[in-house]
Image (spheres, rainbow, N blue to C red):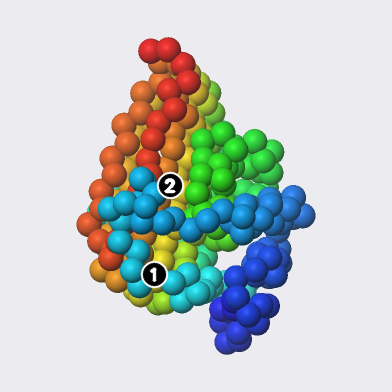
Amino acid sequence: MSVMVKEQLIEKAASFSADTVRALSQAWNEPQWMLDFRLAAWQQFDALEWPKATDEAWRRTKLTGFDLKNFQPVVYPNGHTPEVDMLIQHELDEMDSAASLVFSEGMIAHRSSKSDLEGQGVIFTDLHTAVNQHPELVKKYFMNQAVTPDFNKITALHAALWDTGTLIYVPKNVKIELPLQVVLNQSVAKTGGYHHTLLVADSGAEVTVVDDLLGGADGMQSEVVELILGDNSIVRYMNLQDFDSSTWNFLRGRAAVGKDADLRWIQVSWGSRLTKAFIDVDMQGKG
């Protein structure tokens, strides 16, 4: 396949391959351990079969017309900053948030904070920054405690090609009063996006996170949401999907919930051509 980069098209393989994974990882200047993770996930993707109509979990899911080769990933070079258009600004203005992140064109378009989150030990950042600045947290929690790459072929593909994403870490007994807002605008048409949300609430922590998902014209989104709740923590999570009516949307979401933790997960799907979501909760403690 090809990797779309602004003003040039870098051909790395004739079809999806490990070379594609290496090209993406290089474009994001990732450390070797993340490249190794991606390549291992690619091997799992290669080994797993595509869902069939006879599979119980996919019996009522019509994938006619879906062809992965139609959705190439997009990477823009360092220094490019996408614009925040009126639609995205409206989303930001509608919510009184403690902090916000906006992803557009496969990268960060906007970030702001109205609270001293850093002073509280809170981490609220994009995943590419987290890979370099907080590798210990990413290695510990990313796709090895809540969601694993081998859940199905599309989840393995996500693990190999993830692009945008957020790490939220709330330390022990820290309470964030206002929501944290993340907006994904899949603004480049006919592309594949792989957005990831990784939320870790330590024991006694409290946080609300809102994911807004937009755009995706004639494209595909394979999203993973991982919520990890320590004992006695409180998490409010909202996933608000309003993709274009031509978007193929796949979601794997899972929460690992500790003792006496409180989770409220609201899933809203307004848009997309098709949405296939696998969401479950692993209740690991009593209460």
The amino acid type of the residue labelled 1 equals Phe
In the rendered image, which quarter contains the C terminus?
top left
Q: Residue placed at 68% from the left, 78% from the top?
A: 12
Tell me if residue 279 comes above or below residue 105 in the rendering: above
Q: Residue placed at 63% from the left, 80% from the top?
A: 14
**Crowding at mark 1 (Cα within 10 Å: few <14, some 14-19, many 20+):** few
The answer to which quarter of the image holds residue 104 is bottom left
Q: Position of residue 9 (x, y in %)?
A: 60, 84
Report the side of 74 relative to 244 (left or right). Answer: right
Residue 66: which disc?
Answer: 1
Tell me if residue 104 comes above or below residue 40 in the rendering: below
Q: Residue placed at 64% from the left, 36% from the top?
A: 140
Report the side of 187 relative to 7 (left or right). Answer: left
- Mark 1 or mark 2: which comes first in sequence? 1
Report the side of 125 relative to 185 (left or right). Answer: right
Report the side of 137 relative to 199 (left or right). Answer: right
Task: List the single residue furthest toward the left.
Answer: 270
In the rendered image, which quarter contains the N terminus?
bottom right
Q: Nearer the viewer, residue 90 or 160?
A: 160
3D distance between C-alphas at marks 1 and 2: 18 Å
Q: Which residue is mark 2?
A: 252
